[in-house]
C-alpha cells in the first residue's frame, strides 16, 4: 500500500502530504513509541517528559515539557516541520499556539483498538515509512484476531479508576473502555464527562463485578487494592495502565494483556 492509495487525513479532517525527512516533535507518549518503532527516531527532535518508551532511544531526544504544560519556546527553537498532538492528551490552547509557527500539526484521536491501523497508516504515509506501517498493521491484526474469535465469556461490569482524591473513572466512549469491550466488559455511565468524578456508594458497588485500579496516571499500588477491597467487598484488581490506555506500539502487547486480565478477574471472582 502506498501513500497515494490512502487519504492522509487526521482527526480534525486536515489533509496532510507525504513529507520524508520531516523534523518531528511528538507530544503524545504512546505515539512517540510508535514513531520510534516505525524507524523515525532519527527524525524526532522533541518529546514530552512522559514519552518514556523506548527508554534508551528517547533518552537522547530533547524534552519540551509535559503533555498539558508544553514549553512552546523550546518547540519553536527546535524548528519542527511537524508536531503530533492528541485530542485527549493535549489542550486546545496548545494546538492553537502551535499552528501559529509549526507548518504541520497532526491531530490524532484513536478511540478503539481498530483505530490503531488508521493511526499507523497516517503516520507511515506522512513520514514515508509506509512499508514499516503496513508490517505493524499486519502484526496488530494478527494479535487482535484470536481475541475476537474466542468464545464470549460472561458479561462483566467493571469500574476503571484512574485517580483518587477525587476518585475518577472513564466513560464508555474512551479508548480504555473500547479495549475492555473486547472482553465483553462494560463500564458504568457516571455522568456526561469522558473522565467523570464519582463517590463510592452501595448502589454503585452493587452494580459492579469488579473494580480495576490503573497504574497510571495515578500510581495505584497493591496497597490501594487491598484497602479498597476490604472497604467495598468485591474483587479489586491492579491493572497495567499502559497496556489498556496506550494506543500505537503498546497496543500490540495490550491486546494480549486483555487475555491475562480476563484470567485475573476469573481467578478473583472464584
Image (tube, rainbow, N blue to C red):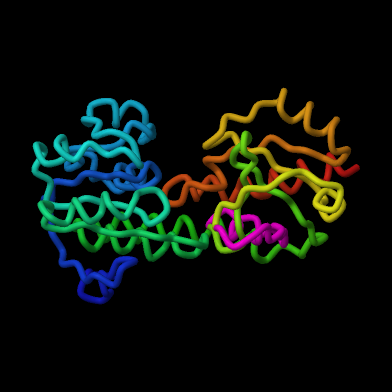
Q: Residue at x 25, y 54 (%)?
A: 95
Quadrant of the snapshot with the N terminus: bottom left
222 in magenta: no
- Total marks placed: 0
Q: Nearer the viewer, residue 148 or 138?
A: 148
Q: Nearer the viewer, residue 65 or 269?
A: 65
Q: Residue at x 65, y 40 (%)?
A: 167
Residue 261, percent from left and from top: 70, 45
Residue 20, percent from left and from top: 13, 55
- Magenta range: 175-193
Q: Is residue 132 above or below residue 11?
A: above
Quadrant of the snapshot with the C terminus: top right
Question: In which quarter of the view is residue 19 placed?
Answer: bottom left
**In the image: residue 102, left or right of residue 173:** left
**In the image: residue 193, left or right of residue 43:** right
Q: Is residue 143 above or below residue 18?
A: above
Q: Is residue 103 visible?
A: yes
Amino acid at each position: 500500500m502506498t501513500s497515494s492509495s490512502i487519504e492522509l487525513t487526521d482527526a480534525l479532517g486536515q489533509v496532510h502530504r507525504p513529507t520524508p525527512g520531516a523534523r518531528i516533535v511528538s507530544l503524545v507518549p504512546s505515539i512517540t513509541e510508535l514513531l520510534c518503532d516505525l524507524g523515525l527516531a532519527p527524525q524526532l527532535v522533541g518529546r514530552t517528559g512522559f514519552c518514556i518508551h523506548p527508554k534508551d532511544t528517547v533518552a537522547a531526544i530533547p524534552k519540551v515539557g509535559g503533555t498539558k504544560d508544553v514549553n512552546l519556546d523550546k518547540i519553536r527553537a527546535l524548528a519542527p516541520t511537524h508536531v503530533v498532538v492528541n485530542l485527549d492528551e493535549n489542550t486546545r490552547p496548545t494546538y492553537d499556539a502551535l499552528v501559529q509557527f509549526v507548518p504541520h500539526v497532526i491531530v490524532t484521536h484513536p478511540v478503539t483498538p481498530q483505530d490503531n491501523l488508521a493511526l499507523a497508516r497516517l503516520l507511515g504515509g506522512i513520514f514515508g515509512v509506509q512499508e514499516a506501517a503496513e508490517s505493524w498493521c499486519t502484526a496488530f491484526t494478527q494479535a487482535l484476531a484470536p481475541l475476537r474469535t474466542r468464545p464470549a465469556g460472561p458479561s462483566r461490569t467493571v469500574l476503571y479508576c484512574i485517580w483518587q482524591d477525587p476518585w475518577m473513572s472513564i466513560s464508555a466512549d474512551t479508548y480504555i473502555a473500547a479495549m475492555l469491550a473486547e472482553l465483553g466488559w462494560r463500564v458504568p455511565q457516571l455522568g456526561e464527562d469522558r473522565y467523570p468524578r464519582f463517590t463510592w456508594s452501595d448502589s454503585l458497588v452493587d452494580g459492579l463485578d469488579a473494580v480495576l485500579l490503573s497504574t497510571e496516571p495515578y500510581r495505584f499500588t497493591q496497597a490501594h487494592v487491598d484497602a479498597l477491597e476490604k472497604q467495598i467487598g468485591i474483587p479489586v484488581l491492579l491493572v497495567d495502565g499502559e497496556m489498556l490506555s496506550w494506543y500505537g506500539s503498546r497496543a500490540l502487547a495490550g491486546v494480549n494483556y486483555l487475555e491475562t486480565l480476563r484470567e485475573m478477574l476469573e481467578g478473583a471472582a472464584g
